[in-house]
Image (cartoon, helix red, strand yellow):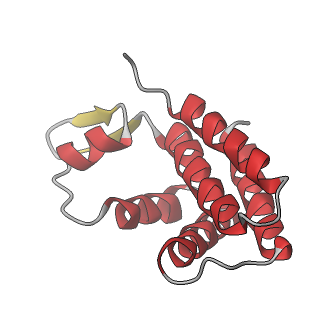
């Protein structure tokens, strides 16, 4: 079955919207906003062609890129680099803020206000709108 980043992004955004209707799961609103954003940017960035000295290589997906470019960094760090290099600075900032807040929500602080979860949702909207235009 062919993997489709856009479908996955929309799926994650749907659960983000569902969780946004509640008030006790703001950490998961933030987390699902980020995981939706990562698939939106993957949709925007791939396929990606990398020019080499002898030829150009086209990677159909982020996973293929990581395998083909022998990237040994963590995947979130690698995607952050690709986003910063290839997307406008405001979209990269929104993506990076989602990445950072998601990390915090998952590993160190899970209690967030509705205001913070709404900010994450706003950042996701900016990423989605850019990546799907």
Task: Classify the position of the N terminus by image quarter.
Answer: top left
How many discs mark residues in the rendered view? 0
x, y percent for residue 24? 76, 66
**Left or right, 47 with reference to 99:** left
**Closer to the camera in the image, 22 or 133:** 22
From the viewer's perspective, is 94 left or right of 50? right
Of residues 6 and 21, the one nearer the viewer is 21
**Residue at 53% across, 44% down:** 39
Identify whether 90 is placed above or below 37: below
Q: What residue is rendered at 42% in x and 33% in y?
A: 47
Rendered image quadrant of residue 95? bottom right
Position of residue 93 relative to residue 33, above or below, is: below
The spot of residue 22 in percent (x, y) is 82, 57
Q: Position of residue 87 (x, y in %)?
A: 58, 56
Quarter occupied by residue 46: top left
The image position of residue 2, as x and y in percent, is: 39, 19
Q: Quadrant of residue 25?
A: bottom right
User: Which residue sits at x=25%, y=35%?
Assistant: 57
Residue found farthest to the front: 24
Left or right? Give the position of 66 relative to 80.
left
**Drawn side of residue 58 relative to residue 12, left or right:** left
Q: Measured along the vertical axis of the image, is residue 40 above or below residue 28?
A: above
- Residue furthest out toward the bottom: 108
Which of the image's four quarters has the C terminus?
A: top right
Q: Residue at x 51, y 83 (%)?
A: 108
């Amino acid at each position: 079955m062919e993997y489709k980043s856009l479908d996955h992004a929309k799926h994650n955004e749907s659960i983000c919207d569902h969780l946004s209707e509640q008030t006790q799961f703001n950490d998961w609103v933030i987390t699902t906003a980020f995981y939706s954003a990562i698939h939106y940017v993957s949709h925007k960035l791939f396929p990606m062609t990398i020019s080499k000295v002898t030829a150009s290589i086209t990677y159909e997906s982020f996973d293929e890129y990581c395998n083909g470019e022998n990237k040994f960094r963590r995947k979130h760090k690698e995607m952050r680099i690709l986003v910063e290099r290839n997307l406008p600075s405001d979209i990269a900032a929104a993506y990076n803020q989602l990445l950072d807040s998601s990390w915090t929500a998952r590993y160190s602080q899970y209690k967030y206000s509705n205001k913070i979860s709404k900010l994450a949702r706003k950042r996701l909207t900016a990423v989605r709108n850019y990546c799907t235009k």
